[in-house]
């Protein structure tokens, strides 16, 4: 059983991690197929991924800022 800081991970968390790893492997394989079969589509895919990462970063920053402001008002 996997452990984090000496504590066993719950079975549900282990299953989630396993699914994430399996999904990452499949995505990597599909990316390699896309690179070889359609490089133009692959470039579009990379652009979309970059845009999504930027959007995610902006959303995380917005949520963290709101949370910090809320904590400052409370404390």
Image (cartoon, grey):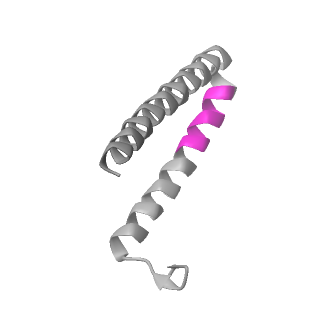
Tell which of 72 and 27 is nearer to you: 72
Tell me which residue sits at (37%, 76%) in the image. 10
Tell which of 28 and 36 is nearer to you: 28
Tell which of 30 and 43 is nearer to you: 43
Tell me which residue sits at (36%, 47%) in the image. 71
Considering only vertical position in the picture, is 30 above or below 36?
below
Tell me which residue sits at (38%, 45%) in the image. 72
Considering only vertical position in the picture, is 42 above or below 31?
above
Residue 46 placed where, x, y %? 61, 24
Q: Range of the magenta residues?
A: 27-35
Q: Residue furthest left?
A: 74
Tell which of 44 and 29 is nearer to you: 44
Residue 40 image-quadrant placement: top right
Considering only vertical position in the picture, is 41 above or below 23?
above
Residue 48 placed where, x, y %? 53, 21
Tell me which residue sits at (69%, 27%) in the image. 36
**Main SS class of the magenta portion in the image:** helix
Residue 29 placed where, x, y %? 60, 43
Q: How many marks?
A: 0
Residue 49 placed where, x, y %? 55, 27
Q: Is residue 10 left or right of residue 34?
A: left
Residue 70 image-quadrant placement: top left
Q: Is residue 53 left or right of residue 74?
A: right
Let me know if residue 30 is in the magenta part: yes
Considering only vertical position in the picture, is 13 above or below 45?
below
């Amino acid at each position: 059983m996997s452990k984090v800081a000496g504590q066993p991970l719950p079975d549900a968390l282990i299953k989630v991690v396993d699914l994430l790893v399996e999904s990452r492997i499949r995505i990597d394989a599909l990316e390699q197929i896309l690179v070889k079969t359609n490089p133009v589509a692959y470039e579009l895919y990379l652009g979309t991924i970059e845009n999504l990462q930027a959007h995610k970063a902006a959303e995380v920053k917005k949520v963290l800022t709101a949370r910090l402001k809320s904590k400052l008002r409370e404390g």
